[in-house]
Image (cartoon, rainbow, N blue to C red):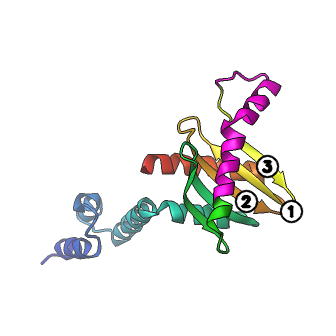
Amino acid sequence: MTLSGTLSKMIRILCPNFPESWFLPALTGKKICVSSIWHRWREASVQLLVKQMTIQDRLSELRTRFEGCEIAAFADLSTQMVLASSAGKGVPQEQLDTLCAEACEALLSNASDVVKSAFSAPQNAAISYSVVPRQGYNRVYVTSPETPEEAICLQCIGRTPVGDILSASCSLLSIVGSDI
């Protein structure tokens, strides 16, 4: 068996989920570039891992990215249900329900109409985020124009880097929306 054939067999064993054609550029020609094969395998493994991340994993990653973020939740505002959540400590369902209800109030209710009129926004305009300060913590609610019924709900203690959280939450919503 040639070196190319051995490497091809090894790739099929190590990477059964990846098409062999993905590695062909590294196997063809007079020189076999093992480094190229390794880099392609590593890239493909990372891509597969990212695709296999659950909403729960993504929420955990979001929560741990920001110091002081205690709770990250993904909610369906149309049903007023938290579909997935991540918390540093156990969080009772009642607290998640309250978080979701407050997100609905902040983003969809008459209170949001008052905010729209205060800023002279059209009544059909969607509010894409809301920051609700509380005693000792802040709650941040983020939705997107593409899926206004889905929201990321966060509870953070201490200083809250709202701009960074909004950016990360919008990215997460675009990924989660494409996964569902």
Residue span colored magenta: 97-124
* Residue appearing at x 45%, y 46% in the figure: 178
* Residue appearing at x 52%, y 64% in the figure: 56
Can you give x and y, in whole percent of width and height, for residue 159 in the image? 84, 59
The one nearer the camera, 166 or 34, is 166
Task: Tell me, yes or no, if residue 173 can be seen here.
Answer: yes
The one nearer the camera, 47 or 104, is 104
* Residue appearing at x 71%, y 49% in the figure: 102
Task: Using the image, tell me which numbered label, if any, was put on residue 136.
Answer: 1
Q: Gap between marks 2 and 1, in whole Å? A: 10 Å
Element on which disc 2 rests? strand
Tell me the kind of residue under disc 2: Gln
Task: Using the image, tell me which numbered label, if any, was put on residue 153.
Answer: none
Task: Using the image, tell me which numbered label, if any, was put on residue 132.
Answer: 3
CA neighbours of label 3 inside 10 A, class few (<14), some (14 to 19), many (20+) = some
CA neighbours of label 2 inside 10 A, class few (<14), some (14 to 19), many (20+) = many
159, above or below 13, in the image = above
CA neighbours of label 1 inside 10 A, class few (<14), some (14 to 19), many (20+) = few
Judge whether residue 119 is colored magenta.
yes
Judge whether residue 172 is colored magenta.
no
Q: Gap between marks 2 and 3, in whole Å? A: 9 Å
Going by the image, does 177 lie left or right of 141? left
Element on which disc 1 rests? loop
Can you give x and y, in whole percent of width and height, for residue 55 in the image? 50, 59
Tell me the kind of residue under disc 3: Val
**Which of the 4 image quarters holds residue 97?**
bottom right
User: Mark 2 — residue?
Assistant: 155
**Which of the 4 image quarters holds residue 149?**
top right
The one nearer the camera, 114 or 33, is 114
Going by the image, does 66 lie left or right of 19? right
Q: Gap between marks 3 and 1, in whole Å? A: 11 Å
